[in-house]
Amino acid sequence: MTAAAAATGVSETTEERPSPAENGWRAVVRLWIGPTTLGAIGVVGLIGAIHLGVGTTSVPGAGMWPAVASTLIIVSALVMGPQPDTEAVHRTDAVRVGGALSLLALFITLFTYTGIFIPALVVLALWLRFLAGRGLVFSLLTAVGTAGGLHLLFGVFFGVGG
Protein backbone atom coordinates (compact mmCIF):
# COMPACT_ATOMS: atom_id res chain seq x y z
CA MET A 1 0.00 0.00 0.00
CA THR A 2 1.38 3.41 -0.92
CA ALA A 3 1.56 6.32 1.50
CA ALA A 4 -1.24 8.15 -0.35
CA ALA A 5 -3.50 5.12 -0.18
CA ALA A 6 -2.72 4.61 3.50
CA ALA A 7 -3.44 8.27 4.27
CA THR A 8 -6.83 8.21 2.55
CA GLY A 9 -7.75 4.73 3.72
CA VAL A 10 -8.42 3.62 0.14
CA SER A 11 -7.15 0.21 -0.87
CA GLU A 12 -5.32 -0.12 -4.17
CA THR A 13 -6.57 -3.65 -4.75
CA THR A 14 -9.06 -4.31 -7.51
CA GLU A 15 -10.92 -7.05 -5.65
CA GLU A 16 -13.85 -4.76 -4.79
CA ARG A 17 -14.32 -3.44 -8.31
CA PRO A 18 -16.55 -5.39 -10.69
CA SER A 19 -14.86 -6.89 -13.71
CA PRO A 20 -15.38 -5.23 -17.11
CA ALA A 21 -17.32 -8.29 -18.26
CA GLU A 22 -19.67 -7.95 -15.29
CA ASN A 23 -20.16 -4.26 -16.01
CA GLY A 24 -20.94 -5.13 -19.63
CA TRP A 25 -23.57 -7.68 -18.64
CA ARG A 26 -25.18 -5.30 -16.17
CA ALA A 27 -25.16 -2.53 -18.74
CA VAL A 28 -26.99 -4.75 -21.24
CA VAL A 29 -29.57 -5.70 -18.60
CA ARG A 30 -30.11 -2.04 -17.70
CA LEU A 31 -30.57 -1.12 -21.36
CA TRP A 32 -33.15 -3.81 -22.09
CA ILE A 33 -34.99 -4.45 -18.78
CA GLY A 34 -37.82 -2.01 -19.53
CA PRO A 35 -38.64 -3.03 -23.09
CA THR A 36 -38.18 -6.73 -22.28
CA THR A 37 -40.51 -6.58 -19.29
CA LEU A 38 -43.10 -4.60 -21.23
CA GLY A 39 -42.88 -7.01 -24.17
CA ALA A 40 -43.24 -10.03 -21.87
CA ILE A 41 -46.38 -8.54 -20.32
CA GLY A 42 -47.78 -7.98 -23.83
CA VAL A 43 -46.99 -11.55 -24.88
CA VAL A 44 -48.65 -13.01 -21.77
CA GLY A 45 -51.70 -10.83 -22.38
CA LEU A 46 -51.85 -11.87 -26.03
CA ILE A 47 -51.67 -15.56 -25.11
CA GLY A 48 -54.50 -15.05 -22.60
CA ALA A 49 -56.55 -13.19 -25.20
CA ILE A 50 -56.11 -16.00 -27.72
CA HIS A 51 -57.26 -18.52 -25.11
CA LEU A 52 -60.39 -16.41 -24.55
CA GLY A 53 -61.14 -16.46 -28.27
CA VAL A 54 -60.50 -13.43 -30.44
CA GLY A 55 -63.29 -13.98 -32.95
CA THR A 56 -63.55 -11.74 -36.01
CA THR A 57 -64.06 -8.03 -36.50
CA SER A 58 -67.73 -8.58 -37.29
CA VAL A 59 -68.26 -11.03 -34.41
CA PRO A 60 -65.62 -10.23 -31.80
CA GLY A 61 -64.85 -12.76 -29.12
CA ALA A 62 -64.10 -12.09 -25.47
CA GLY A 63 -60.38 -11.82 -26.24
CA MET A 64 -60.64 -9.23 -29.03
CA TRP A 65 -59.92 -6.09 -26.99
CA PRO A 66 -57.33 -7.77 -24.76
CA ALA A 67 -55.60 -8.93 -27.96
CA VAL A 68 -55.63 -5.39 -29.37
CA ALA A 69 -54.30 -3.94 -26.11
CA SER A 70 -51.62 -6.63 -25.81
CA THR A 71 -50.52 -6.07 -29.40
CA LEU A 72 -50.18 -2.35 -28.71
CA ILE A 73 -48.10 -3.13 -25.63
CA ILE A 74 -45.80 -5.38 -27.68
CA VAL A 75 -45.43 -2.73 -30.39
CA SER A 76 -44.68 -0.12 -27.71
CA ALA A 77 -41.94 -2.35 -26.30
CA LEU A 78 -40.39 -2.74 -29.77
CA VAL A 79 -40.56 0.98 -30.48
CA MET A 80 -39.20 1.77 -27.03
CA GLY A 81 -35.91 0.00 -27.71
CA PRO A 82 -32.98 0.14 -25.29
CA GLN A 83 -33.17 2.78 -22.58
CA PRO A 84 -29.70 4.20 -21.83
CA ASP A 85 -30.80 6.53 -19.04
CA THR A 86 -32.31 3.99 -16.65
CA GLU A 87 -31.69 4.01 -12.93
CA ALA A 88 -30.73 1.06 -10.81
CA VAL A 89 -33.65 -0.97 -9.49
CA HIS A 90 -33.69 -1.12 -5.71
CA ARG A 91 -35.18 -3.91 -3.65
CA THR A 92 -37.95 -1.68 -2.26
CA ASP A 93 -39.01 -0.80 -5.82
CA ALA A 94 -39.16 -4.46 -6.77
CA VAL A 95 -41.24 -5.23 -3.67
CA ARG A 96 -43.69 -2.44 -4.54
CA VAL A 97 -44.08 -3.71 -8.10
CA GLY A 98 -44.58 -7.25 -6.81
CA GLY A 99 -47.20 -5.97 -4.38
CA ALA A 100 -49.01 -4.12 -7.16
CA LEU A 101 -49.04 -7.19 -9.40
CA SER A 102 -50.27 -9.31 -6.49
CA LEU A 103 -53.12 -6.88 -5.86
CA LEU A 104 -54.08 -6.98 -9.54
CA ALA A 105 -54.13 -10.78 -9.40
CA LEU A 106 -56.30 -10.56 -6.27
CA PHE A 107 -58.66 -8.19 -8.09
CA ILE A 108 -59.03 -10.57 -11.04
CA THR A 109 -59.61 -13.54 -8.75
CA LEU A 110 -62.20 -11.78 -6.59
CA PHE A 111 -63.90 -10.20 -9.62
CA THR A 112 -64.42 -13.65 -11.13
CA TYR A 113 -66.41 -14.79 -8.10
CA THR A 114 -68.02 -11.68 -6.62
CA GLY A 115 -68.44 -8.97 -9.25
CA ILE A 116 -66.86 -5.54 -9.12
CA PHE A 117 -67.82 -4.03 -5.73
CA ILE A 118 -65.86 -6.25 -3.31
CA PRO A 119 -62.65 -6.51 -5.38
CA ALA A 120 -62.62 -2.75 -6.03
CA LEU A 121 -63.15 -2.04 -2.35
CA VAL A 122 -60.50 -4.46 -1.07
CA VAL A 123 -57.84 -3.82 -3.69
CA LEU A 124 -58.20 -0.05 -3.71
CA ALA A 125 -58.07 0.15 0.08
CA LEU A 126 -54.93 -2.01 0.20
CA TRP A 127 -53.34 -0.16 -2.73
CA LEU A 128 -53.91 3.28 -1.23
CA ARG A 129 -52.86 2.26 2.26
CA PHE A 130 -49.74 0.22 1.55
CA LEU A 131 -48.51 1.13 -1.93
CA ALA A 132 -49.44 4.82 -1.96
CA GLY A 133 -48.83 5.32 1.77
CA ARG A 134 -52.11 7.11 2.42
CA GLY A 135 -53.80 7.22 5.79
CA LEU A 136 -56.26 4.56 6.88
CA VAL A 137 -59.32 6.81 6.91
CA PHE A 138 -58.52 8.31 3.50
CA SER A 139 -57.89 4.85 2.03
CA LEU A 140 -61.14 3.39 3.35
CA LEU A 141 -63.31 6.37 2.39
CA THR A 142 -61.83 6.56 -1.10
CA ALA A 143 -62.20 2.80 -1.60
CA VAL A 144 -65.83 2.81 -0.46
CA GLY A 145 -66.67 5.83 -2.62
CA THR A 146 -64.94 4.47 -5.70
CA ALA A 147 -66.36 0.95 -5.32
CA GLY A 148 -69.83 2.44 -4.81
CA GLY A 149 -69.41 4.59 -7.92
CA LEU A 150 -68.31 1.59 -9.97
CA HIS A 151 -71.31 -0.38 -8.71
CA LEU A 152 -73.67 2.45 -9.68
CA LEU A 153 -72.06 2.86 -13.07
CA PHE A 154 -71.85 -0.80 -14.08
CA GLY A 155 -74.47 -2.46 -11.86
CA VAL A 156 -77.22 0.12 -12.00
CA PHE A 157 -76.63 2.33 -15.05
CA PHE A 158 -75.28 -0.28 -17.50
CA GLY A 159 -77.11 -3.22 -15.93
CA VAL A 160 -74.02 -5.44 -15.80
CA GLY A 161 -74.20 -8.05 -13.02
CA GLY A 162 -72.13 -7.51 -9.88
Image (spheres, helix red, strand yellow):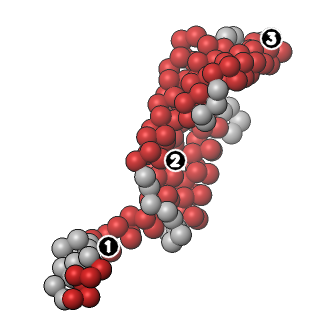
Circle 2 Cα neighbour tier, 10 Å, few/some/many (<14 / 14–19 / ≥20): many
Where is residue 19 shown, x and y percent of the image?
Answer: 24, 75
Quadrant placement of the N terminus: bottom left
Residue 136 visible in the current orientation:
yes
Q: Nearer the viewer, residue 32 or 93?
A: 93
Residue found at x 38% / y 64%:
29
Q: Nearer the viewer, residue 17 or 43?
A: 17
Specify which label sits upstream in the sequence, 2 or 3. Answer: 2
Residue found at x 58% / y 18%:
122
State whether residue 95 is above or below residue 114: below
Q: Nearer the viewer, residue 20 or 75?
A: 20
Q: Amino acid at mark 1?
A: Asn
Residue 10 tag number: none
Residue tagged 3: 156
Cα–Cα gap, marks 3 and 1? 57 Å
Residue tagged 1: 23
